[in-house]
Image (cartoon, rainbow, N blue to C red):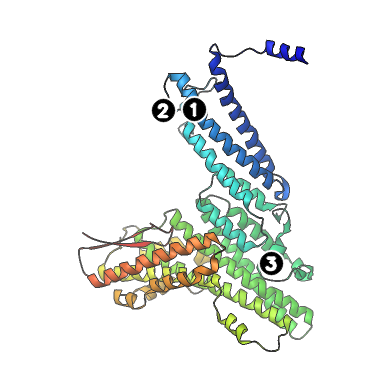
Amino acid sequence: MNCKLQLVQFNIEPLQTNFDLEEGYCKALLCRLRFRKHFCHVLTCMRRPQGRGLELARKHIASCISELGSILNSAEFLMFNAYGTCEDGTEDRTTASGRQAIGFDANLNSRISAPTPPRSIKILSWKKAIKYFENLLHHLDIICSYPLDPSLDALLHFVAQFQKAQPDLVARVHLQLLLVQDGKLYGRYPILAVIIRAARLTEVIMRHDILKNEYFVQLGQIVINMLKILCTNAAWQRRKLGKILQDWRAIYSQLELAFRKESGEGSSISNGENASAGILKHILIWVEEQTYWIAHRFLVLGFELELYSPSEYCMVYWYLSVVLIRLAEKKHLKMTVSDGSAKQKGKKRKDSPKDLAREARIPPAISFLQCQICLAEGLALLLAALRNELIVLQSPSPFNSEHERFLQHFELLQKACIPDLISYPSFKESTSCARISSVVMYNYFKDAQKIAKEVKSSFLNDPDRSAELRILEQVAEHNSVALNVISRAGALDPSLKVSFEFIHHPYFATVVVKRS
Protein backbone atom coordinates (compact mmCIF):
# COMPACT_ATOMS: atom_id res chain seq x y z
CA MET A 1 0.00 0.00 0.00
CA ASN A 2 2.80 2.41 0.92
CA CYS A 3 4.60 1.54 -2.32
CA LYS A 4 1.48 2.36 -4.36
CA LEU A 5 1.00 5.67 -2.51
CA GLN A 6 4.61 6.64 -3.16
CA LEU A 7 4.20 5.71 -6.84
CA VAL A 8 1.06 7.88 -7.16
CA GLN A 9 2.76 10.80 -5.44
CA PHE A 10 5.76 10.39 -7.71
CA ASN A 11 3.64 10.36 -10.89
CA ILE A 12 1.53 13.46 -10.01
CA GLU A 13 3.14 16.68 -11.16
CA PRO A 14 1.81 20.22 -10.62
CA LEU A 15 0.39 21.91 -13.71
CA GLN A 16 1.69 25.35 -12.69
CA THR A 17 5.22 26.63 -12.69
CA ASN A 18 4.30 28.46 -9.49
CA PHE A 19 3.33 25.69 -7.05
CA ASP A 20 1.43 28.16 -4.81
CA LEU A 21 -1.24 28.62 -7.51
CA GLU A 22 -2.06 24.92 -7.79
CA GLU A 23 -4.56 24.83 -4.92
CA GLY A 24 -6.47 27.93 -6.08
CA TYR A 25 -6.83 26.69 -9.65
CA CYS A 26 -7.92 23.24 -8.49
CA LYS A 27 -10.60 24.72 -6.21
CA ALA A 28 -11.87 26.97 -9.02
CA LEU A 29 -12.06 24.03 -11.43
CA LEU A 30 -13.66 21.61 -8.96
CA CYS A 31 -16.47 23.96 -7.89
CA ARG A 32 -17.38 24.44 -11.56
CA LEU A 33 -17.40 20.69 -12.20
CA ARG A 34 -19.48 20.07 -9.07
CA PHE A 35 -21.97 22.78 -10.11
CA ARG A 36 -22.44 21.15 -13.53
CA LYS A 37 -22.89 17.73 -11.95
CA HIS A 38 -25.52 18.92 -9.44
CA PHE A 39 -27.35 21.01 -12.08
CA CYS A 40 -27.55 17.98 -14.36
CA HIS A 41 -28.99 15.98 -11.44
CA VAL A 42 -31.56 18.75 -10.78
CA LEU A 43 -32.92 18.54 -14.32
CA THR A 44 -32.87 14.74 -14.31
CA CYS A 45 -34.74 14.52 -10.99
CA MET A 46 -37.35 17.06 -12.07
CA ARG A 47 -38.11 15.00 -15.17
CA ARG A 48 -38.97 11.90 -13.15
CA PRO A 49 -42.62 10.89 -13.60
CA GLN A 50 -45.29 11.95 -11.10
CA GLY A 51 -42.96 14.39 -9.34
CA ARG A 52 -41.08 11.61 -7.56
CA GLY A 53 -37.71 13.33 -7.84
CA LEU A 54 -38.69 16.78 -6.55
CA GLU A 55 -37.40 16.28 -3.01
CA LEU A 56 -34.03 15.03 -4.26
CA ALA A 57 -33.93 17.85 -6.83
CA ARG A 58 -34.20 20.40 -3.99
CA LYS A 59 -31.10 18.92 -2.34
CA HIS A 60 -29.17 19.25 -5.60
CA ILE A 61 -30.47 22.83 -5.99
CA ALA A 62 -29.06 23.67 -2.55
CA SER A 63 -25.72 22.16 -3.62
CA CYS A 64 -25.81 24.19 -6.87
CA ILE A 65 -26.34 27.43 -4.93
CA SER A 66 -23.46 26.53 -2.62
CA GLU A 67 -21.17 25.84 -5.58
CA LEU A 68 -22.20 29.14 -7.21
CA GLY A 69 -20.94 30.86 -4.07
CA SER A 70 -17.60 29.06 -4.44
CA ILE A 71 -17.45 30.06 -8.12
CA LEU A 72 -17.98 33.71 -7.16
CA ASN A 73 -15.28 33.48 -4.51
CA SER A 74 -12.82 32.08 -7.05
CA ALA A 75 -13.20 35.13 -9.30
CA GLU A 76 -10.89 37.30 -7.19
CA PHE A 77 -8.10 34.70 -7.33
CA LEU A 78 -8.46 34.16 -11.10
CA MET A 79 -8.56 37.88 -11.89
CA PHE A 80 -5.53 38.63 -9.75
CA ASN A 81 -3.44 36.01 -11.52
CA ALA A 82 -4.65 37.16 -14.94
CA TYR A 83 -4.06 40.90 -14.51
CA GLY A 84 -2.22 41.30 -11.22
CA THR A 85 -5.19 43.16 -9.76
CA CYS A 86 -8.55 42.24 -8.20
CA GLU A 87 -10.41 45.20 -9.71
CA ASP A 88 -13.11 44.29 -12.18
CA GLY A 89 -12.87 46.82 -14.97
CA THR A 90 -14.65 44.85 -17.68
CA GLU A 91 -18.42 44.50 -17.34
CA ASP A 92 -18.89 42.46 -20.52
CA ARG A 93 -16.27 39.81 -19.78
CA THR A 94 -17.54 36.26 -20.32
CA THR A 95 -15.06 34.52 -17.98
CA ALA A 96 -14.27 34.96 -14.29
CA SER A 97 -10.65 35.94 -15.01
CA GLY A 98 -11.56 38.37 -17.78
CA ARG A 99 -9.42 36.54 -20.30
CA GLN A 100 -10.89 35.30 -23.56
CA ALA A 101 -12.03 31.69 -23.38
CA ILE A 102 -9.70 29.23 -25.12
CA GLY A 103 -11.29 27.66 -28.20
CA PHE A 104 -14.42 29.82 -27.99
CA ASP A 105 -15.11 33.19 -29.60
CA ALA A 106 -17.93 35.00 -27.80
CA ASN A 107 -18.37 37.47 -30.67
CA LEU A 108 -18.54 34.89 -33.46
CA ASN A 109 -22.32 34.70 -33.44
CA SER A 110 -22.79 38.46 -33.84
CA ARG A 111 -20.25 38.66 -36.68
CA ILE A 112 -21.53 35.90 -38.97
CA SER A 113 -25.29 35.98 -38.31
CA ALA A 114 -27.54 37.39 -41.02
CA PRO A 115 -29.26 40.73 -40.38
CA THR A 116 -32.65 39.04 -40.77
CA PRO A 117 -34.21 36.76 -38.11
CA PRO A 118 -33.03 34.65 -36.43
CA ARG A 119 -30.76 37.48 -35.33
CA SER A 120 -27.53 37.20 -33.38
CA ILE A 121 -27.77 36.53 -29.66
CA LYS A 122 -25.49 38.43 -27.34
CA ILE A 123 -23.81 36.11 -24.85
CA LEU A 124 -24.35 36.99 -21.20
CA SER A 125 -21.44 38.44 -19.29
CA TRP A 126 -19.96 36.31 -16.51
CA LYS A 127 -21.71 38.29 -13.76
CA LYS A 128 -25.07 38.18 -15.54
CA ALA A 129 -24.67 34.45 -16.14
CA ILE A 130 -24.15 33.85 -12.41
CA LYS A 131 -27.22 35.99 -11.64
CA TYR A 132 -29.21 34.10 -14.28
CA PHE A 133 -28.44 30.74 -12.67
CA GLU A 134 -29.24 32.10 -9.20
CA ASN A 135 -32.69 33.20 -10.40
CA LEU A 136 -33.25 29.98 -12.35
CA LEU A 137 -32.37 27.82 -9.34
CA HIS A 138 -34.66 29.91 -7.13
CA HIS A 139 -37.58 29.40 -9.55
CA LEU A 140 -36.86 25.67 -9.88
CA ASP A 141 -36.81 25.43 -6.08
CA ILE A 142 -40.26 27.07 -5.92
CA ILE A 143 -41.57 24.46 -8.38
CA CYS A 144 -40.01 21.60 -6.43
CA SER A 145 -41.42 22.88 -3.12
CA TYR A 146 -45.02 22.88 -4.41
CA PRO A 147 -46.93 20.11 -2.56
CA LEU A 148 -48.67 18.81 -5.76
CA ASP A 149 -52.11 19.70 -4.44
CA PRO A 150 -54.90 18.06 -6.49
CA SER A 151 -57.04 21.18 -5.92
CA LEU A 152 -57.30 23.08 -9.21
CA ASP A 153 -58.04 26.38 -7.44
CA ALA A 154 -54.85 26.08 -5.39
CA LEU A 155 -52.87 25.15 -8.50
CA LEU A 156 -54.15 28.12 -10.54
CA HIS A 157 -53.32 30.47 -7.66
CA PHE A 158 -49.81 28.98 -7.44
CA VAL A 159 -49.17 29.33 -11.19
CA ALA A 160 -50.45 32.94 -11.20
CA GLN A 161 -48.18 33.82 -8.25
CA PHE A 162 -45.24 32.00 -9.84
CA GLN A 163 -45.65 33.92 -13.11
CA LYS A 164 -45.42 37.25 -11.24
CA ALA A 165 -41.68 36.62 -10.84
CA GLN A 166 -41.37 36.38 -14.66
CA PRO A 167 -39.53 33.04 -14.60
CA ASP A 168 -37.19 31.94 -17.35
CA LEU A 169 -38.24 29.63 -20.19
CA VAL A 170 -36.37 26.69 -18.60
CA ALA A 171 -38.34 27.04 -15.35
CA ARG A 172 -41.66 27.43 -17.18
CA VAL A 173 -41.01 24.35 -19.33
CA HIS A 174 -40.27 22.23 -16.27
CA LEU A 175 -43.41 23.53 -14.57
CA GLN A 176 -45.48 22.51 -17.60
CA LEU A 177 -43.83 19.07 -17.70
CA LEU A 178 -44.68 18.62 -14.02
CA LEU A 179 -48.31 19.73 -14.30
CA VAL A 180 -49.37 17.67 -17.31
CA GLN A 181 -48.08 14.11 -17.71
CA ASP A 182 -49.87 11.44 -19.76
CA GLY A 183 -53.06 13.52 -19.75
CA LYS A 184 -53.12 13.59 -15.94
CA LEU A 185 -52.40 16.27 -13.37
CA TYR A 186 -48.84 15.62 -12.14
CA GLY A 187 -49.19 12.24 -13.88
CA ARG A 188 -51.20 11.12 -10.82
CA TYR A 189 -54.77 12.42 -10.97
CA PRO A 190 -57.11 11.90 -13.96
CA ILE A 191 -58.14 15.31 -15.23
CA LEU A 192 -61.85 14.51 -14.89
CA ALA A 193 -61.31 13.65 -11.22
CA VAL A 194 -59.63 17.03 -10.77
CA ILE A 195 -62.61 18.77 -12.43
CA ILE A 196 -65.09 16.83 -10.26
CA ARG A 197 -63.16 17.91 -7.16
CA ALA A 198 -63.01 21.54 -8.34
CA ALA A 199 -66.78 21.52 -8.92
CA ARG A 200 -67.21 20.31 -5.31
CA LEU A 201 -68.66 16.93 -6.26
CA THR A 202 -67.79 13.65 -4.55
CA GLU A 203 -65.37 11.21 -6.17
CA VAL A 204 -68.17 8.61 -6.31
CA ILE A 205 -69.47 10.58 -9.30
CA MET A 206 -66.49 9.27 -11.30
CA ARG A 207 -68.37 5.99 -11.78
CA HIS A 208 -71.39 7.70 -13.36
CA ASP A 209 -72.04 6.96 -17.04
CA ILE A 210 -72.61 10.61 -17.92
CA LEU A 211 -68.87 11.29 -17.61
CA LYS A 212 -68.30 9.09 -20.66
CA ASN A 213 -69.99 11.66 -22.90
CA GLU A 214 -67.89 13.43 -25.51
CA TYR A 215 -68.34 16.90 -23.99
CA PHE A 216 -66.69 15.74 -20.74
CA VAL A 217 -63.72 14.41 -22.70
CA GLN A 218 -63.51 17.78 -24.48
CA LEU A 219 -63.73 19.61 -21.15
CA GLY A 220 -60.79 17.61 -19.81
CA GLN A 221 -58.72 18.48 -22.88
CA ILE A 222 -59.60 22.18 -22.56
CA VAL A 223 -58.41 22.19 -18.93
CA ILE A 224 -55.13 20.52 -19.97
CA ASN A 225 -54.66 23.14 -22.71
CA MET A 226 -55.35 25.92 -20.20
CA LEU A 227 -52.70 24.59 -17.79
CA LYS A 228 -50.16 24.48 -20.62
CA ILE A 229 -51.03 28.02 -21.70
CA LEU A 230 -50.62 29.35 -18.14
CA CYS A 231 -47.00 28.17 -18.19
CA THR A 232 -46.07 30.33 -21.20
CA ASN A 233 -44.74 33.89 -21.21
CA ALA A 234 -47.15 36.77 -20.57
CA ALA A 235 -47.62 37.87 -24.20
CA TRP A 236 -48.24 34.37 -25.56
CA GLN A 237 -50.39 33.51 -22.55
CA ARG A 238 -52.71 36.48 -23.06
CA ARG A 239 -53.07 35.79 -26.76
CA LYS A 240 -53.95 32.13 -26.20
CA LEU A 241 -56.23 32.78 -23.22
CA GLY A 242 -58.29 35.15 -25.34
CA LYS A 243 -58.72 32.47 -27.98
CA ILE A 244 -59.39 29.58 -25.59
CA LEU A 245 -62.35 31.51 -24.16
CA GLN A 246 -64.26 30.54 -27.32
CA ASP A 247 -63.69 26.85 -26.45
CA TRP A 248 -64.88 27.36 -22.87
CA ARG A 249 -68.00 29.12 -24.09
CA ALA A 250 -68.70 26.36 -26.64
CA ILE A 251 -68.35 23.60 -24.04
CA TYR A 252 -70.62 25.59 -21.70
CA SER A 253 -73.31 25.66 -24.41
CA GLN A 254 -73.03 21.88 -24.88
CA LEU A 255 -73.28 21.25 -21.14
CA GLU A 256 -76.24 23.63 -20.85
CA LEU A 257 -78.14 21.76 -23.59
CA ALA A 258 -77.39 18.44 -21.88
CA PHE A 259 -78.52 19.87 -18.52
CA ARG A 260 -81.85 21.06 -19.97
CA LYS A 261 -82.41 17.68 -21.56
CA GLU A 262 -81.60 15.78 -18.35
CA SER A 263 -83.69 18.16 -16.23
CA GLY A 264 -86.72 17.74 -18.47
CA GLU A 265 -86.48 13.95 -18.58
CA GLY A 266 -85.36 13.51 -14.98
CA SER A 267 -88.52 15.07 -13.53
CA SER A 268 -90.68 12.35 -15.08
CA ILE A 269 -88.46 9.28 -15.52
CA SER A 270 -86.11 8.25 -12.74
CA ASN A 271 -83.78 9.29 -9.96
CA GLY A 272 -80.80 8.26 -12.08
CA GLU A 273 -81.58 11.03 -14.57
CA ASN A 274 -81.95 13.51 -11.70
CA ALA A 275 -78.47 12.56 -10.56
CA SER A 276 -77.18 13.34 -14.06
CA ALA A 277 -78.85 16.74 -13.96
CA GLY A 278 -77.29 17.41 -10.55
CA ILE A 279 -73.81 16.59 -11.86
CA LEU A 280 -74.29 18.81 -14.90
CA LYS A 281 -75.56 21.66 -12.72
CA HIS A 282 -72.39 21.63 -10.60
CA ILE A 283 -70.14 21.35 -13.65
CA LEU A 284 -71.99 24.19 -15.43
CA ILE A 285 -71.46 26.55 -12.49
CA TRP A 286 -67.79 25.60 -12.29
CA VAL A 287 -67.23 26.06 -16.05
CA GLU A 288 -68.79 29.53 -15.92
CA GLU A 289 -66.69 30.48 -12.89
CA GLN A 290 -63.58 29.25 -14.69
CA THR A 291 -64.48 31.24 -17.79
CA TYR A 292 -64.64 34.45 -15.77
CA TRP A 293 -61.34 33.58 -14.07
CA ILE A 294 -59.70 33.34 -17.51
CA ALA A 295 -61.32 36.64 -18.56
CA HIS A 296 -59.95 38.28 -15.40
CA ARG A 297 -56.49 36.88 -16.12
CA PHE A 298 -56.73 38.13 -19.72
CA LEU A 299 -57.49 41.70 -18.59
CA VAL A 300 -54.84 41.75 -15.86
CA LEU A 301 -52.09 40.60 -18.24
CA GLY A 302 -52.85 43.67 -20.35
CA PHE A 303 -51.48 45.84 -17.52
CA GLU A 304 -48.36 43.70 -17.20
CA LEU A 305 -47.72 44.00 -20.94
CA GLU A 306 -48.50 47.76 -20.89
CA LEU A 307 -51.17 47.40 -23.58
CA TYR A 308 -53.44 50.08 -22.10
CA SER A 309 -52.83 53.80 -22.37
CA PRO A 310 -53.92 56.12 -19.49
CA SER A 311 -56.85 57.35 -21.59
CA GLU A 312 -58.11 53.74 -21.77
CA TYR A 313 -57.84 52.94 -18.04
CA CYS A 314 -61.46 53.98 -17.46
CA MET A 315 -62.94 51.41 -19.85
CA VAL A 316 -60.51 48.71 -18.68
CA TYR A 317 -61.35 49.17 -14.98
CA TRP A 318 -65.04 49.30 -15.82
CA TYR A 319 -64.82 46.02 -17.75
CA LEU A 320 -62.63 44.49 -15.03
CA SER A 321 -65.19 45.39 -12.34
CA VAL A 322 -67.99 43.72 -14.33
CA VAL A 323 -65.91 40.55 -14.81
CA LEU A 324 -64.97 40.48 -11.11
CA ILE A 325 -68.63 40.86 -10.09
CA ARG A 326 -69.61 37.90 -12.27
CA LEU A 327 -66.66 35.87 -10.99
CA ALA A 328 -67.69 36.54 -7.37
CA GLU A 329 -71.30 35.61 -8.18
CA LYS A 330 -70.34 32.29 -9.79
CA LYS A 331 -67.87 31.42 -7.04
CA HIS A 332 -70.47 32.16 -4.37
CA LEU A 333 -73.10 30.18 -6.29
CA LYS A 334 -70.74 27.20 -6.46
CA MET A 335 -70.23 27.34 -2.70
CA THR A 336 -73.96 27.71 -2.04
CA VAL A 337 -74.97 24.82 -4.31
CA SER A 338 -72.34 22.47 -2.87
CA ASP A 339 -73.28 23.41 0.71
CA GLY A 340 -76.95 22.88 -0.14
CA SER A 341 -76.21 19.42 -1.55
CA ALA A 342 -74.27 18.52 1.58
CA LYS A 343 -77.19 19.63 3.78
CA GLN A 344 -79.67 17.54 1.80
CA LYS A 345 -77.49 14.49 2.29
CA GLY A 346 -77.19 15.26 6.01
CA LYS A 347 -81.00 15.74 6.33
CA LYS A 348 -80.75 18.19 9.21
CA ARG A 349 -84.13 18.73 10.88
CA LYS A 350 -83.57 22.20 12.27
CA ASP A 351 -80.87 24.80 11.74
CA SER A 352 -79.38 26.22 14.93
CA PRO A 353 -78.83 30.01 15.31
CA LYS A 354 -75.08 29.39 15.03
CA ASP A 355 -75.54 27.65 11.69
CA LEU A 356 -77.73 30.47 10.38
CA ALA A 357 -75.15 33.08 11.43
CA ARG A 358 -72.42 31.05 9.75
CA GLU A 359 -74.45 30.93 6.53
CA ALA A 360 -75.05 34.70 6.59
CA ARG A 361 -71.32 35.40 6.85
CA ILE A 362 -69.66 36.13 3.49
CA PRO A 363 -66.89 33.60 2.70
CA PRO A 364 -63.35 35.11 2.80
CA ALA A 365 -62.72 34.22 -0.87
CA ILE A 366 -65.77 36.29 -1.88
CA SER A 367 -64.75 39.19 0.37
CA PHE A 368 -61.32 39.14 -1.27
CA LEU A 369 -62.99 39.58 -4.66
CA GLN A 370 -65.33 42.27 -3.27
CA CYS A 371 -62.30 44.29 -2.19
CA GLN A 372 -60.97 44.17 -5.76
CA ILE A 373 -64.42 45.02 -7.16
CA CYS A 374 -64.59 48.16 -5.00
CA LEU A 375 -61.14 49.26 -6.15
CA ALA A 376 -61.95 48.66 -9.83
CA GLU A 377 -65.30 50.47 -9.59
CA GLY A 378 -63.74 53.35 -7.67
CA LEU A 379 -60.98 53.81 -10.24
CA ALA A 380 -63.40 53.53 -13.18
CA LEU A 381 -65.76 56.17 -11.76
CA LEU A 382 -62.93 58.50 -10.68
CA LEU A 383 -61.39 58.33 -14.14
CA ALA A 384 -64.81 58.93 -15.72
CA ALA A 385 -65.48 61.91 -13.41
CA LEU A 386 -62.08 63.45 -14.15
CA ARG A 387 -62.71 63.02 -17.84
CA ASN A 388 -66.22 64.48 -17.63
CA GLU A 389 -65.34 67.47 -15.42
CA LEU A 390 -61.69 68.25 -16.04
CA ILE A 391 -61.42 67.03 -19.62
CA VAL A 392 -58.22 65.15 -18.69
CA LEU A 393 -56.93 61.71 -19.58
CA GLN A 394 -58.45 62.14 -23.02
CA SER A 395 -56.18 61.64 -25.98
CA PRO A 396 -58.39 61.56 -29.08
CA SER A 397 -56.60 59.57 -31.73
CA PRO A 398 -56.79 60.56 -35.40
CA PHE A 399 -56.70 56.87 -36.27
CA ASN A 400 -59.41 55.26 -34.12
CA SER A 401 -62.30 56.32 -31.91
CA GLU A 402 -62.97 55.29 -28.31
CA HIS A 403 -65.53 52.76 -29.56
CA GLU A 404 -62.92 51.20 -31.87
CA ARG A 405 -60.40 50.99 -29.02
CA PHE A 406 -63.05 49.35 -26.83
CA LEU A 407 -63.57 46.68 -29.48
CA GLN A 408 -59.83 46.33 -30.00
CA HIS A 409 -59.17 45.56 -26.31
CA PHE A 410 -62.24 43.44 -25.59
CA GLU A 411 -63.04 41.86 -28.96
CA LEU A 412 -62.16 38.32 -27.82
CA LEU A 413 -64.27 38.73 -24.66
CA GLN A 414 -67.17 40.16 -26.66
CA LYS A 415 -67.05 37.26 -29.14
CA ALA A 416 -67.36 34.82 -26.24
CA CYS A 417 -70.19 36.95 -24.71
CA ILE A 418 -68.19 37.55 -21.53
CA PRO A 419 -70.05 38.99 -19.77
CA ASP A 420 -73.49 38.73 -21.35
CA LEU A 421 -75.20 41.94 -22.53
CA ILE A 422 -72.07 44.06 -22.00
CA SER A 423 -71.15 46.44 -24.79
CA TYR A 424 -69.70 49.87 -25.51
CA PRO A 425 -73.11 51.64 -25.10
CA SER A 426 -73.48 50.12 -21.62
CA PHE A 427 -69.99 51.41 -20.74
CA LYS A 428 -70.90 54.93 -21.91
CA GLU A 429 -74.19 54.81 -20.04
CA SER A 430 -72.43 53.80 -16.79
CA THR A 431 -69.72 56.47 -16.93
CA SER A 432 -71.15 59.47 -18.80
CA CYS A 433 -72.88 60.91 -15.70
CA ALA A 434 -70.00 60.37 -13.24
CA ARG A 435 -69.02 63.43 -11.19
CA ILE A 436 -66.44 63.99 -8.46
CA SER A 437 -69.18 64.73 -5.91
CA SER A 438 -70.90 61.39 -6.58
CA VAL A 439 -67.59 59.51 -6.44
CA VAL A 440 -66.91 61.09 -3.02
CA MET A 441 -70.42 60.23 -1.83
CA TYR A 442 -70.08 56.57 -2.82
CA ASN A 443 -66.44 56.22 -1.78
CA TYR A 444 -65.58 52.77 -3.09
CA PHE A 445 -62.00 53.15 -1.87
CA LYS A 446 -63.16 53.36 1.76
CA ASP A 447 -65.26 50.24 1.24
CA ALA A 448 -62.26 48.41 -0.22
CA GLN A 449 -60.10 49.51 2.72
CA LYS A 450 -62.73 48.34 5.21
CA ILE A 451 -63.13 44.92 3.54
CA ALA A 452 -59.36 44.41 3.38
CA LYS A 453 -59.02 45.11 7.11
CA GLU A 454 -61.90 42.81 8.05
CA VAL A 455 -60.92 39.83 5.89
CA LYS A 456 -57.18 39.99 6.59
CA SER A 457 -57.44 37.69 9.62
CA SER A 458 -59.04 34.95 7.48
CA PHE A 459 -55.86 34.54 5.42
CA LEU A 460 -53.25 34.28 8.16
CA ASN A 461 -52.22 30.85 6.85
CA ASP A 462 -51.98 32.12 3.26
CA PRO A 463 -48.96 34.47 3.00
CA ASP A 464 -49.62 35.34 -0.66
CA ARG A 465 -53.21 36.45 -0.07
CA SER A 466 -52.23 38.26 3.14
CA ALA A 467 -49.55 40.21 1.28
CA GLU A 468 -52.01 40.98 -1.54
CA LEU A 469 -54.60 42.27 0.94
CA ARG A 470 -52.04 44.54 2.61
CA ILE A 471 -51.19 46.05 -0.78
CA LEU A 472 -54.87 46.45 -1.73
CA GLU A 473 -55.53 48.17 1.59
CA GLN A 474 -52.58 50.49 0.97
CA VAL A 475 -53.82 51.39 -2.53
CA ALA A 476 -57.37 51.94 -1.24
CA GLU A 477 -56.18 54.20 1.59
CA HIS A 478 -53.95 56.24 -0.70
CA ASN A 479 -56.69 56.63 -3.33
CA SER A 480 -59.26 57.63 -0.70
CA VAL A 481 -56.98 60.44 0.50
CA ALA A 482 -56.28 61.52 -3.10
CA LEU A 483 -60.02 61.62 -3.83
CA ASN A 484 -60.62 63.91 -0.85
CA VAL A 485 -57.80 66.21 -2.00
CA ILE A 486 -59.31 66.43 -5.49
CA SER A 487 -62.76 67.11 -4.01
CA ARG A 488 -61.54 69.88 -1.67
CA ALA A 489 -59.38 71.56 -4.32
CA GLY A 490 -62.22 71.67 -6.79
CA ALA A 491 -62.62 69.97 -10.10
CA LEU A 492 -61.69 73.04 -12.15
CA ASP A 493 -58.45 73.90 -10.33
CA PRO A 494 -55.91 74.29 -13.19
CA SER A 495 -52.92 73.79 -10.88
CA LEU A 496 -54.06 70.29 -9.91
CA LYS A 497 -52.26 67.49 -11.76
CA VAL A 498 -53.69 63.98 -11.38
CA SER A 499 -51.85 60.88 -12.58
CA PHE A 500 -52.28 57.13 -12.14
CA GLU A 501 -49.18 55.12 -11.29
CA PHE A 502 -48.58 51.47 -10.43
CA ILE A 503 -46.47 52.13 -7.35
CA HIS A 504 -47.86 49.45 -5.03
CA HIS A 505 -49.94 47.05 -7.12
CA PRO A 506 -49.28 45.68 -10.63
CA TYR A 507 -52.74 46.52 -11.99
CA PHE A 508 -54.64 48.62 -9.42
CA ALA A 509 -53.32 52.12 -9.97
CA THR A 510 -52.44 54.55 -7.20
CA VAL A 511 -53.84 58.06 -7.69
CA VAL A 512 -51.08 60.68 -7.45
CA VAL A 513 -52.16 64.32 -6.97
CA LYS A 514 -49.68 67.17 -7.45
CA ARG A 515 -49.84 70.93 -7.82
CA SER A 516 -47.98 72.50 -10.70
Q: Are marks 2 and 1 in contact (CB under 8 Å)?
A: yes
Q: Residues within 10 Å of mark 1 (few under 14, many from 20)?
A: some
- Left or right: 483 in relation to 24: left
- Residue 75, labelled with which disc? 1
Residue drawn at (50%, 68%), measured in percent from left and top? 456
| Three-letter amino acid code of the residue under disc 3 | Arg
Q: Position of residue 245 (x, y in %)?
A: 57, 63
Please state which of the two labelled residues, at mark 2 or mark 3, is closer to the viewer: 2
- The tag earlier along the polypeptide, 2 or 1, is 1
Residue drawn at (44%, 57%), measured in percent from left and top? 506
Q: Quadrant of residue 267?
A: bottom right
Q: Is disc 3 placed on a helix, strand or loop?
A: helix
Residue drawn at (48%, 22%), measured in percent from left and top? 100
Q: Position of residue 474 (x, y in %)?
A: 40, 64
Question: Can the viewer see residue 107 in this picture?
Answer: no
Q: Residues within 10 Å of mark 3 (few under 14, many from 20)?
A: some
Question: Can the viewer see residue 484 in this picture?
Answer: yes
Q: Quadrant of residue 287?
A: bottom right
- Residue 197, labelled with which disc? 3
Please identify the residue farthest to the front as the structure is shown: 2
- The tag earlier along the polypeptide, 2 or 3, is 2
Q: Are marks 2 and 3 in contact (CB under 8 Å)?
A: no
Real-space Cα distance between discs 2 and 3?
Answer: 57 Å
Quarter of the figure with the C terminus? bottom left
Q: Which residue is mark 2?
A: 88
